[in-house]
Amino acid sequence: MLKAARFLIPAALLFVISISAARADELLDVQNKIDAKNKEHSQTQNDLDTIKQQIASLSGSVYGTQAQADEANKKVEDIRQSLNKVEQDLAKKKDDLQLAINIRDGQIRYIYKHPGNSPLELFITTDGFENFTQLLGLQKKVLDTSKELISVINEEMLLVKKQRDEVAQASADLEKIAADINAQLASLQGQLYYQSNQQNVLSGQLVEIQNNLKNLTGQQTQLIAAKLAAADRNQTVGDSAPASEPLPNAGFSPAYVFLTYGYPHRVGMSQYGAYGRALAGQGYVTILKAYYSGVSVGGYPVPGTINVAGYGNISFEDNYMRGISEMPRSWHIEALKAQAVAARTYALNWMQSHPGQAICTTEACQVYRASSANCSGTYNSRWCDAVNATRGVVITYAGSPITAWFASTAGGYTLSSQEVWGGSTPYALGIRDYGPSGAYDGPAYGNSPWYHTFWNGKYCSGAFPWLTKAEISDLFNAAMLSQANSSYNQYLSQSPACPGRTPGWSASQVAGQLNSLGVNDVGTLSNVIVAFDGRGNTSSVTFVSNKYPSGKTFSGSFFRSIFNLRSLGNLVIITSRYDILIN
């Protein structure tokens, strides 16, 4: 609470020190206004303290559901409205204070010019010692009162500034919390979108398995899902290419390993394929039109800003696009341009399909790193060159930005969205992704580490994928028993099983049951042959043995289902295109 100054200024004294009655009225009016506003300042401070407590209660909170994040955002908006009201009140106080400031400045100038008559001057100009004493005292009182008024106004100014500073800090704290809430909300939404896509991929594989293998138990379905989940990797390359995982030495012979082409969904642009095409001399427009059917690639209206989780509204081209980190910046410039256009298109499509929502910064949407959004250094400048060279360029179909799916590796063939997610998209059709020397994402061009590789290992931990002749023979025996009678599928889980998993029949039990049905077991395996359908899938798997010299053939889809059910450890065949290596 500010000090209150009270002014009783006699007309005689004002005459002596040359202060006009008008000035005295102004001083008294200013003081009255300051006194009246002391209570307002107190209420404003109370409002501010309440707001700061509300902000503190939101700080650091974690929201696990969209409903919680939405409720927190509502609280943020309520606090924001309260802060706006306080700010408006302070702005009005600042305007009212300007009159006091003007009077204060006048008083300062007046005191500087008229510091008061000296005691000698007063003594000479007054009649008698009594009048001299009275005037000397009154002169001192007026000067002291003027100085006190100056001090009061200064304090008033400092208080208004302090409260305005508090409002500014509270606003900054609130917006930081709001950004954090929106980042969490965007992450939740992005994860939901990501998990939905992943779940659709997983569900598609499980549906395929369930169509191939009737009478599976719930535990067996969970087993297969767990093995597929253990193979989860980043969908896209990122700004640092993943290291290749070389095949370990088998240590025995013959040794068998199934190798998979591509990962994960194989829809849209293959990033390693784009890199391989660029190395082969293709420009970014040619690359994009190869992966997205019937599209146009050209200028399109791009917004000035984009709402990014954790960062708020930032420049679309000069910040967000420069911070996209989905492809190594050392790659060929035409591949980088293709990635820039795909990323720009993906973001625009996201904005149109998720109005008002912040785009997340993980691969659940697409990866953005603020620390990478600068153009300094050769590494960063190459990506910025790609962004700038394609500024405003977007992939459209029928005039609208497409959902520009892209993934690390297609394995020589992309798939249609219909095959993977069950929804037909006219521009997301499967293609044969080959050049004169081989697949564009294969060793001759892009050389993806996921072009032709194994997934997980046959032990419950580790990455040893090699199977013995007995182990692969057991897989073929299980396939034959399943075909003989699907009711046996419930017994064909892995054996031995990892901890927490229910084991199926042993290899000898499976072979014995086959023989009891009058079906020969594999016997002595001599060869395994894999064939392809020319559209990115393994069409058949055939084994040859002493008991099956002409071979026994299974469809690629059926054998993959049996493999993913019965294979040891977490071994899986992750995509529909695979083959076998025998050492």
Image (tube, rainbow, N blue to C red):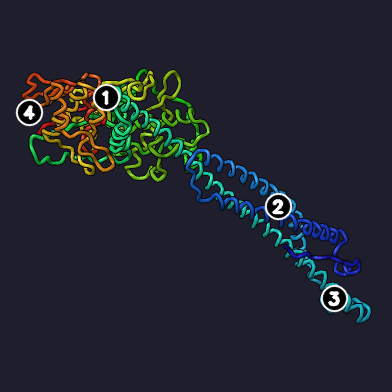
Provide the secondary structure element on which disc 2 rests: helix
Residue carrying label 2? 94
Contact between marks 4 and 1 (CB within 8 A): the answer is no
In this picture, residue 95 sits left or right of residue 185: right
Q: Nearer the viewer, residue 171 or 497?
A: 497
Disc number lying in front (3 or 1): 1
Disc 1 crowd rating (10 Å Cα; few below 14, some 14-19, many 20+) is: many
Q: Position of residue 106 (x, y in %)?
A: 77, 60
Residue at numbered disc 4: 524
Using the image as rendered, state which of residue 278 and residue 199 is in the foreground.
Answer: 199
User: Pointer 2: residues within 10 angstroms few (<14), some, or many (20+)?
Assistant: some
Cα separation between marks 3 and 1:
110 Å
Q: Which residue is mark 1?
A: 213
Task: Kindly identify the amino acid type of the residue bearing the numbered disc 4.
Answer: Thr
Q: Nearer the viewer, mark 2 or mark 1?
A: 1
Q: Can you give x and y, in whole percent of width and height, for residue 399 in the image? A: 45, 20
Tell me if mark 4 has few (under 14), some (14-19) or many (20+) residues whose alpha carbon lies within 10 angstroms of its own: some
Is the residue 131 above or below the residue 7 in the image? Answer: below
- Please say if the residues under marks 2 and 1 sit with CB atoms less than 8 Å apart: no
Q: Nearer the viewer, residue 437 or 486?
A: 486
First in sequence: mark 2 or mark 4? 2
Q: CA–CA distance between discs 2 and 4? A: 95 Å
Residue at mark 3: 137
Comes first in the chain, label 2 or label 3: 2
Residue 443 appears in the figure: yes
Where does the N terminus fall, quadrant-wise? Answer: bottom right
Whether residue 486 sits left or right of residue 53 in the image: it is left
Helix, strand or loop at label 1? It is loop
**Residue 311: x %, y % from top left:** 48, 43
Which is nearer the N-term, disc 3 or disc 1? 3
Q: Nearer the viewer, mark 2 or mark 4?
A: 4
